[in-house]
């Protein structure tokens, strides 16, 4: 039994955690519906609606619950599942658990809190998009947070059996490469609007074809390098870490159809001739 905001579920017991994780594996089936629906009420394809939320507020409130959920589980679950581990005389959670939790929080501190206020402008987002993103964040934060806090490796011996130090270090390095590339390509998109605003125009609703970095060959490199981040995270956590694997697979399932549909948007706006030589998000594939 666990106690918390929702006893036995938030944070979850081991049995309930396994149930949630097994359902989380099926997320790509729901995300695949995006291939059949071109509508996406956010960003470039945002449209007027009485059900729209203000862009910055919507973004903050749908993204932040993920890392807050992870922190909540790291705070509450160890003492309930492994009391001897976190007692005054106990060794506490291994440093690997804390490093991985810190990486997750680092990414989402930027993505949830800094990103919306760094943007020169953010289009309104539909409440349905907000609700789906919020659900993604809550489930992902719960699955990863419970694994890091209690249901994954909680001793150095268990970590040694899960992943070697070399693989952990390489995974962290890959994560940081993806994180830095994510910052860079996000800022290139912001710079398009900043240039327009410096010339006296309105940044909101202004679009160009970006050309810096990986934008030379693809239209959504900020998606691609985020997948690189979470591939590195999965590598560091060990290939047997199901929540980290699900996170990566579920991100690809959610973002790939948006990128492919986004390329169609670019073609409609700028013409086939200017876009045809660029991939959507995966060079040589899509």
Image (cartoon, rainbow, N blue to C red):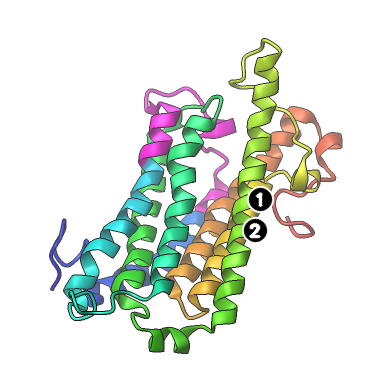
Numbered range of the magenta stretch: 32-61
The relative height of residue 59 versus residue 164 in the rendered view (above or below) is: above
The relative height of residue 108 versus residue 147 in the rendered view (above or below) is: above
Q: Tell me what residue is drawn at x 83 percent, y 42 percent.
A: 276
- How dense is the environment of label 2, judged by Cα within 10 Å: few (below 14), some, or many (20 and up)? some
Q: Tell me what residue is drawn at x 47 percent, y 22 percent.
A: 48
> Residue 254: x, y in percent?
52, 53
Secondary element under disc 1, as helix, strand or loop, is helix
Q: How many numbered markers are drawn? A: 2
Q: Quarter-wise, where is residue 58 in the image?
A: top left
**From where the camera sits, is residue 256 visible?**
no
Residue with the mark numbered 2: 177
Task: Tell me, yes or no, whether the highlighted magenta stretch contains residue 53.
Answer: yes
Which of the labelled discs sits on residue 90, or is there none? Answer: none
**Disc 2 from disc 1: Cα separation:** 6 Å
Q: Quarter-wise, where is residue 166 in the image?
A: bottom right
Q: Tell me what residue is drawn at x 28 percent, y 71 percent.
A: 17
Residue with the mark numbered 1: 181
Secondary element under disc 2, as helix, strand or loop, is helix
Among all residues in the image, which is located at the extreme top? 200
CB contact under 8 Å: marks 2 and 1: yes
- How dense is the environment of label 1, judged by Cα within 10 Å: few (below 14), some, or many (20 and up)? many
> Residue 142: x, y in percent?
32, 62
The relative height of residue 273 versus residue 7 in the rendered view (above or below) is: above
Q: Tell me what residue is drawn at x 69 percent, y 18 percent.
A: 196
Left or right: 84, with 36 as reference point? left
Left or right: 193, with 160 as reference point? right
């Amino acid at each position: 039994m666990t106690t918390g905001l929702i006893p036995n579920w938030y944070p979850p017991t081991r049995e309930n955690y396994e149930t949630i994780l097994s359902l989380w594996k099926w997320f790509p089936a729901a995300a695949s519906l995006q291939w059949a629906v071109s509508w996406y009420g956010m960003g470039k394809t945002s449209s007027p609606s009485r059900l729209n939320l203000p862009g910055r507020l919507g973004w903050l409130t749908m993204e932040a619950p993920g890392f807050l959920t992870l922190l909540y589980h790291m705070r509450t679950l160890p003492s309930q599942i492994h009391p001897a581990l976190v007692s005054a005389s106990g060794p506490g959670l291994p440093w690997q658990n804390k490093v991985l939790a810190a990486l997750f929080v680092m990414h989402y501190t930027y993505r949830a809190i800094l990103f919306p206020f760094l943007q020169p402008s953010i289009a309104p987002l539909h409440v349905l998009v907000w609700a789906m993103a919020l659900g993604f964040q809550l489930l992902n934060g719960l699955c990863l947070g419970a694994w890091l806090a209690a249901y994954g490796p909680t001793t150095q011996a268990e970590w040694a059996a899960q992943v070697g130090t070399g693989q952990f270090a390489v995974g962290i390095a890959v994560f940081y490469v993806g994180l830095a590339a994510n910052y860079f390509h996000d800022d290139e998109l912001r710079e398009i609007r900043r240039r327009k605003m410096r010339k006296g125009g309105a940044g909101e609703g202004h679009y160009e074809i970006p050309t810096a970095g990986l934008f030379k060959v693809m239209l959504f490199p900020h998606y691609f390098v985020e997948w690189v981040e979470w591939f590195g995270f999965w590598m560091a956590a060990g290939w047997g870490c199901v929540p980290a694997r699900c996170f990566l697979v579920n991100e690809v399932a959610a973002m790939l159809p948006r990128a492919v549909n986004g390329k169609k948007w670019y073609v409609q706006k700028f013409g086939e001739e200017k876009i045809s030589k660029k991939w959507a998000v995966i060079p040589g594939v899509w």
